[in-house]
Each structure stands twice: as C-alpha cells, then as structure tokens.
Image (cartoon, rainbow, N blue to C red):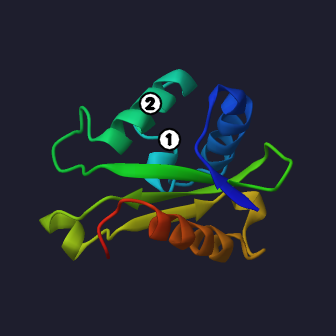
Amino acid sequence: MKLIKLTENYKNEWKSLIDEFETNQEKIIPLGMRGSSSSFLDFLIESENNSKGINLSNGIVPSDIYFLVKDKSNFLIGAIDIRHYLNDKLLKSGGNVGYGVRPSERNKGYATQILALALKNVKRCKYPKF
C-alpha cells in the first residue's frame, strides 16, 4: 500500500471514487478528495494550489491530499487531507487531518493504513509539529 498525489493518469479512477460516494448519497470525506472542482483537471490545479497556499477561500488553510492505492495498482481506495497548520476554527473543530475510504472498501483496515502512512509522510515533510 502507498499514498500518492494524483496525476493525469488517475482521471478515471478518481471519477470512480467520487461517483461511488455520490451513488451511495454520502458526503465526500475528506472534502479535499474532490474539493470544489467540477473536473479532474480543475481538481489537480486546485490540489496543487491548496498545497502551495494559492487562491485559498476564506478560512481555508494550505493542505496536501494523498490517495491510498495498492502497490502496482491505480485503484483508489481512499484519501487523507493533511493541513499544514490550523486556524482558530480548525483548532476547535476539524483538526490537522481528515480521511476517508470509498464505501465498498470499508471495514478492511484501510483507514488505519492511510493514517499510518500519512504519519510517516508528515515526519519527512516541512509541516510544523502537531
């Protein structure tokens, strides 16, 4: 298992992931899994901008979104959104991370794996200590 940032090669898999949440009439969590994008290309641009702190909406802080895939697979199992720091609102509700697993892959231990892999990433990154 590994966490990745999406590239153009994941367009169909991303659409499948989002469609599964919508088909099940579930809220997409973390929101960064889709953002406010209406297309995959917009999502890639928005994700990169979010990571760099560019064009953020009021109250939004920079964050990185990573997706869980099985090794040698493009199948997206879920995602984790890691905020670079917290504002006053997030200190009260929201926190540093949000993660979710597609409905068909729940109860298989993937959420635990997403969090464990993300913690390893955080230790290697420039994020402030949580």
Circle 2: residue type: Ser
- Spatial separation of the CA atoms under disc 1 and disc 2: 6 Å
The answer to whether mark 1 and mark 2 are in CB contact below 8 A is: yes
**Neighbour tally class for label 2: few under 14, some 14-19, many 20 plus, Cα within 10 Å:** some
Q: Between 105 and 74, which is closer to the camera in this rendering?
A: 74
Residue matched to label 1 = 34
Q: Where is residue 56 drawn, in percent x and y?
A: 24, 38
Q: Which disc number belongs to residue 37?
A: 2
Q: Where is residue 121 drawn, in percent x and y?
A: 53, 64
The total of numbered circles placed on residues is: 2
Residue at the (50%, 54%) spot, across then down: 27
Q: Where is residue 117 drawn, in percent x and y?
A: 61, 69
Residue at the (46%, 24%) spot, across then down: 42
Q: Between 2 and 58, which is closer to the camera in this rendering?
A: 2
Q: Where is residue 119 drawn, in percent x and y?
A: 52, 72
Circle 1: residue type: Arg
